[in-house]
Image (spheres, rainbow, N blue to C red):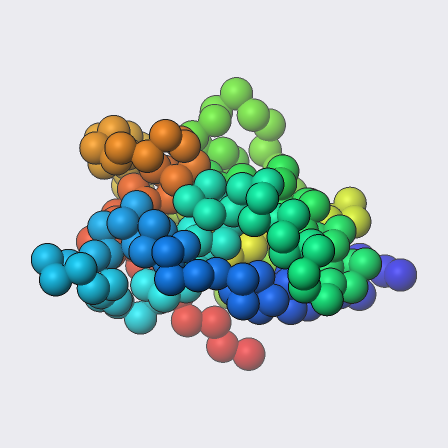
Amino acid sequence: MDRSSTYTDVKNNLTTLNQKLREQLTKDHYFRAAAALGMIDANGSIVFDREDAAAALTELAVHEPVSADEAFRSEASSTLKLTPSEKKALDAYKDSYTSLFRISSLSVGQGTAVLQDLLHRDQPEITVMDLRLSRFLTEGLLLFTRIITVDGLTVTAGPDFMFPSNIDQFLLHRGKKIAKKSSHADSGVRNFAAFNELHKTDGIRIVYKS
């Protein structure tokens, strides 16, 4: 199977897996995620203040420790009718992570993007296969996203929080301050909440058109 076909299969499996995982979420899962994102109003209701807020809430609820612990994954694996490929993707999510990246270079022909991790500068640049990034975005843009490797192929997953190329130092400084205000024990949850908040005020909205 060529890389393009593998990419299509991986993305399709991630999509169907996430649809099934959402079926496992309870009201408590959503409210824990909403609390981490500051989305609960004075009346105790979850408030969606922008178009992609629901996607951010679901991503946090499904894949970060507010609910996505080993018990959650184990229950999902045993109760949901997952295909072998979906089970492999579920296992891969254990090693997935989010961070703020700079798009160092793009290759339309290869459908790849080279990303520099700005939160972990000691890490080498990574090459991800992402047809949307390579075709529709520009080098230098900043991107907060999830990285996951399935079947030897590294791709992005979940919502993309895009930012202008020239505000990296501002984002790192403000993101650190916002994350420190969170009482959540997990740094991944704190960072996700911080960059979700920054995307509301300083992000750019990307519309992918075929």
Marker count (numbered): 0
| The N terminus: image quadrant | bottom right
- Asked if residue 183 lies left or right of residue 185, the reply is left
Residue 188 can be seen in this image: yes
Q: Residue most toward the left?
A: 42
Give coordinates of residue 58: x percent, y percent: 43, 60
Residue furthest bottom in the image: 210
In this view, the residue farthest toward the right is 1
- From the viewer's perspective, tell me whether residue 94 is left or right of residue 119: right
The image quarter containing residue 157 is bottom right
Residue 56 showing in the rendered view: no
Q: Is 125 drawn above or below residue 19 in the view shown?
A: above
Question: Which x, y percent locates residue 205?
Answer: 34, 64
Reply above or below: 81 against 78. below
> Is 92 displayed left or right of 41 in the figure?
right
The foreground one among 185 and 198 is 185
Say whether residue 150 is left or right of residue 204. right
Residue at the image position 60 percent from the left and 27 percent from the top: 124
In x, y percent, where is residue 131? 62, 63
User: Which residue: 50% across, 54% down?
Assistant: 62
Q: Is residue 20 positioned above or below 98 on the image?
A: below
Residue furthest top in the image:
122
Q: Residue at x 36, y 30 (%)?
A: 185
Work out whether 87 lies above or below 18. above
Q: Position of residue 74 (x, y in %)?
A: 65, 48
Quarter in which the C terminus is drawn: bottom right
- Seen at 46% across and 41% down, the residue is 65
